[in-house]
Image (tube, rainbow, N blue to C red):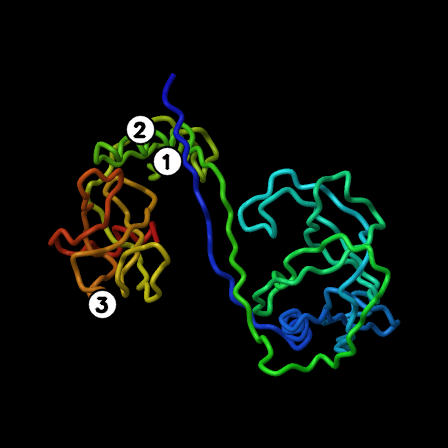
Amino acid sequence: MPEVLKAPLAVEFPFTRSLGPVQSAFLTGLRERVVLGVRTVDGRTLVPPVEYDPVTAEEIRDLVAVAATGTVTTWAWNHEPRRGQPLDTPFAWVLVRLDGADTALLHALDAPGPDAVRTGMRVRVRWAEERSGAITDIACFEPYAGDDTEVTVHAGEFDEPVTGIVAPARLDYTYSPGRAQSAYIHALADRRTVGERCPTCRKVYVPPRGACPTCGVATSEQVEVGPRGTVTTFCIVNIKAKNLDIEVPYVYAHIALDGADLALHGRIGGIPYDQVRMGLRVEAVWTEGARYPDHYRPTGEPDAEYDAYKELL
């Protein structure tokens, strides 16, 4: 049985967003150990706050402080915490309706086990020791046996308010390429580039997908393409990527390898970034032990005519 290829992959990027006046006040309040909600036209207090009434869609900015104590309205036990979650030991996800609020806030509850959690139990905020103006300023909730409800009167105005946040987004998964792309990857290990030809339209797709994207029929006939190709279009990258040791600016291009009917992408090197152009003839450059080309460099051939690659743009 042929080897089934698989590899762990992570898609990660930091999402930067600015905050409106309501969210700015809410997050700045957490930094100062104050929980703020927003009052709707019909008198309900929403926590977390929103900028528009969910019923009338009217803009709302009437901030009101609520207590750091509350009641669990529902919960679920988390047996195996994952990376980036509030606690590194088993805990409960809980919806907590803070005293003074009419909606519930989702967060973690630090409890010794599921038998210690119940709907209706009283809890309070455990504040993080270091706070920066983020939901993580609430480290978690903890069981609370007291019956006092302390609400701090606050107008929602702070010195040095938080005006923006960076929210990291990450997806971890295991990728298995399947038959067609496995053959493509194995060929790259031998410094060959292999595509598959559609039995109907006769186009050669690289990388192969196992089916023709135009005709929708299965492909199985392997065709070796390249090793040279033509730059069909490109972009100049001016922002340095995390964990990528390439100095900016550099060029990333779509490259139509000779014999292929679909352009693949790759980095262009061996030429100043401002001299890369459509129609430039290039070839793959491999590094010792690599399983794929490091970059593509000019071959020195005359540029390809536009008509030769216009259908591949």
How far is the residue under mark 1 from the one under mark 2?
Answer: 9 Å
Which image quadrant: the C terminus? bottom left
Which residue carries the number 3 mark?
274
Which residue carries the number 1 mark?
208
Q: Residues within 10 Å of mark 2 (few under 14, many from 20)?
A: some
Which residue is found at the position 82% from the left and 72% from the top?
40
Which residue occupies the extreme left position in the image? 300
Which residue is found at the position 37% from the left and 57% from the top?
242
Which residue carries the number 2 mark?
222
Amino acid identity at mark 1:
Pro
Please indicate whether residue 281 sits to the left or right of residue 186 in the image. left
Please indicate whether residue 125 sits to the left or right of residue 274 in the image. right
Proximity of marks 1 and 2: CB atoms separated by less than 8 Å: yes
How far is the residue under mark 3 from the one under mark 1?
Answer: 32 Å
Of callouts 1 and 2, which one flags the residue occurring earlier in the amino acid sequence? 1
Q: Nearer the viewer, residue 280 or 169?
A: 169
Percent x, y for residue 232? 29, 54
Q: Secondary structure at mark 2?
A: strand
Of callouts 3 and 1, which one flags the residue occurring earlier in the amino acid sequence? 1
Amino acid identity at mark 3:
Asp
How far is the residue under mark 2 from the one under mark 3?
Answer: 36 Å
